[in-house]
Image (cartoon, rainbow, N blue to C red):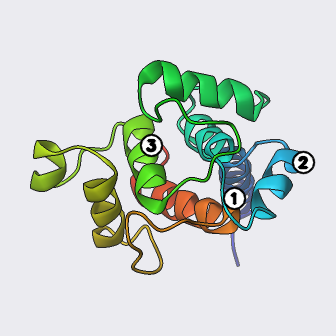
């Protein structure tokens, strides 16, 4: 039989783990639902996922604020709000936002091409994709979760 005190400590630890896990994606449900519904992901959605998951903008910030922050950092260029985003561009944005260093080629030539290769190599992308391939919102949410799970959500 489990001692009552040990049981309550384990229960408290499990509750804390659920709260921490839930806070990783504490973004507004309406924004996440809109991103999940995008057949072709937009620059605004990519910036929102990258910037909020890295803690660079608040969870309640708008996608426009996240895109402006990414532009100010020089990570996404002068993209239109609704302009499509490629796998390589999203991988590069995520790696920069989270401060993740890549392999040798990424260190020499940092950019979307080698960021995409790094995402595939590290297993963050569930499938092999070309750096220039357009991605869906659902795909971005999935690879964001994979990356945060493996990196720990820390910059």
Looking at the rendered image, the quarter that the C terminus falls into is top left
Distance from disc 2 to disc 3, alpha carbons, whole Å, reads 22 Å
Q: Residue at x 22, y 51 (%)?
A: 102
Label annotation for residue 134: none
Q: Residue furthest top?
A: 72
Label annotation for residue 30: 2
Disc 2 residue crowd, few under 14, some 14–19, many 20+, Cα 10 Å: few
Which of the marked residues, 3 or 1, is nearer the chain's N terminus? 1
Which of the marked residues, 1 or 2, is nearer the chain's N terminus? 1
Above or below, 97 against 15 in this view is: above
Q: Which residue is mark 1?
A: 14
On the picture, is 152 further left or further right than 120?
A: right
Q: Quadrant of residue 5?
A: bottom right
Q: Residue at x 57, y 35 (%)?
A: 51
Q: Which residue is mark 3?
A: 93
Q: In the rendering, at what x and y percent does residue 29 appear?
A: 87, 49
Answer whether labels 3 and 1 touch (C-beta < 8 Å): no
């Amino acid at each position: 039989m489990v001692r009552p005190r040990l049981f309550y400590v384990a229960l408290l630890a499990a509750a804390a783990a659920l709260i921490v896990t839930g806070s990783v994606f504490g973004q507004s449900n309406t924004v996440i639902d809109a991103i999940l519904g995008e057949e072709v992901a937009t620059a605004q959605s990519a910036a929102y996922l990258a910037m909020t998951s890295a803690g660079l903008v608040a969870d309640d910030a708008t996608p426009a604020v996240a895109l402006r922050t990414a532009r100010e950092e020089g990570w996404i260029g002068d993209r239109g709000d609704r302009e499509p985003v490629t796998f390589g561009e999203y991988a590069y944005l995520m790696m920069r936002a989270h401060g993740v260093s890549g392999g040798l080629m990424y260190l020499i030539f940092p950019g979307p091409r080698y960021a995409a290769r790094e995402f595939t190599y590290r297993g963050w992308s569930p499938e092999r994709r070309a750096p220039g391939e357009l991605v869906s919102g659902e795909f971005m949410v999935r690879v964001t979760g994979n990356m945060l799970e493996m990196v720990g959500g820390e910059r």
